[in-house]
Amino acid sequence: MLRWLIGGGREPQGLAEKSPLQTIGEEQSQNPYTELIVLKAHHDIVRFLVQLDDYRFASAGDDGIVVVWNAQTGEKLLELSGHTQKITAIIPFPSLESCEEKNQLILTASADRTVIVWDCDAGRQVQRISSFQSTVKCLTVLQRLDVWLSGGNDLCVWNRELELLCKTSHLSDTGISALIEIPKNCVVAAIGKELIIFRLVAPTEESLEWNILEVKRLLDHQDNILSLVNVNDLSLVTGSHVGELIIWDILDWTMQAYERTYWDPSLQLDTQQEIKLCQKSNDISIHHFTCDEENVFAAVGRGLYVYNLQLKRVIACQKTAHDSRVLHTAKLPSRQLISCSEDGSVRIWELREKQQLAAEPVPTGFFNMWGFGRVNKQANQPVKKQQENAALCSLELVGDLIGHSSAVEMFLYFEDHGLVTCSADHLIILWKNGEQESGLRSLKLFQKLEENGDLYLTG
């Protein structure tokens, strides 16, 4: 474990062509993360981080091992080995409130077609399932029903004892890419370009069997769905490979908002050809979402876009937030946003309000902000007039964390212990608030001096 003190600033990397990437100088007054601790335990890409409690987290990736860490000190607490291939999903499995034993369990799925339950307090493997016909790509716990679901080429429902309660028939060869819980004992599964709503039927006096029923298929996306998250108690959001953002009503599964202006379906052109013309690889794919009560923050290609739920429009964007595709985002307190990328950087942004000048045109669509949307100018004049007088926001770079040498896959934010990042460079970095850490070291020094009798206080 290595601890470094770092200064601000990031020099632009050598690129094949000049990039409009926003940079920040050496002085990063709003960036608290001026110390870092490098954690080494993995020997392949670290893809997953999951928070276990207020001070512990687990990491997992392509080496098939799970490591449990102390987020405060960076100490390695446990190393759990059991999978023979890369880990494809990991999720906490909380104990029931009524349960006397409160051991922290986690579920891990692997390309070796197994799922393992781990006890992170005892540091042992509790149970293993190896009956899967395909790789499990996603896991979801339904706490209220005390069951968990595995998504691969089919959808399976399991109880806490790892007994199979019910399953769907074979859904697709590509498998379920994302899975979330919604009300009415339902879940939403993303399979290719389709969203499928399933309802779980718990045992009753009439039927003692569990069942899972397909309720509805939503076929509005034109390409594969890459991201699926709950926005709030009323909505969920999906994003596709070709940049479609759709807000759905979480109760009746109808479309609330739809952003797609990169091609005009009224033109008699081949859709796939149109898409190829409009994009470079991954330039408009929506890889990740994070949300708060007001906005959806979308990682779109190399950029970041802020979509306001009430206005149903983009209110701020950074078209080139990173040199490469943005892989993960998270909303912080004080209107801040963190993003990480394939370029190895982690950047902190602040959402600031600004008054739009009347002479400055406002893009009316999600991707017109990029410049390749086709919009009927006359039809959008009233909308543009209204938007020109509205208060918009900007995303301003306030911090740049440089420590990883390869793609940063994701991160966790601990309010009390800092930021944790994991990377394709096999490393985990614990980013610390330098001012806070300095204060803690001074406090410990005074306490030690007092214990040794070297500190005398005079009245």
Image (cartoon, rainbow, N blue to C red):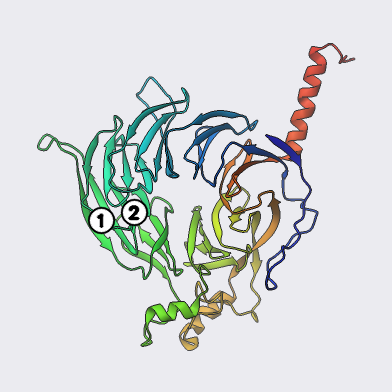
Residue at mark 1: 171
Residue at 40% from the left image edge and 67% from the top image edge: 257
Report whether 193 appears left or right of 60: left
Q: Position of residue 143 (x, y in %)?
A: 35, 36
What residue is at 61 percent from the left and 43 percent from the top?
427
Which residue is painted at 59% across and 54% down in the image? 407
Q: For the point 38% across and 19% down, which residue is it?
A: 100
* SS at badge 1: loop
Label 1 close to label 2 by CB (< 8 Å):
yes
Which residue matches tag 2? Answer: 176
Q: Along the horizontal axis of the image, is 113 left or right of 213?
A: right
455 lies above or below 391: above
Q: Quadrant of residue 98?
A: top left
Classify 93 as above or below 346.
Answer: above
Sequence-wise, which precedes: disc 1 or disc 2? 1
Assess disc 1: are there few (<14), some (14-19) or many (≥20) residues with their C-alpha within 10 Å of its C-alpha: some
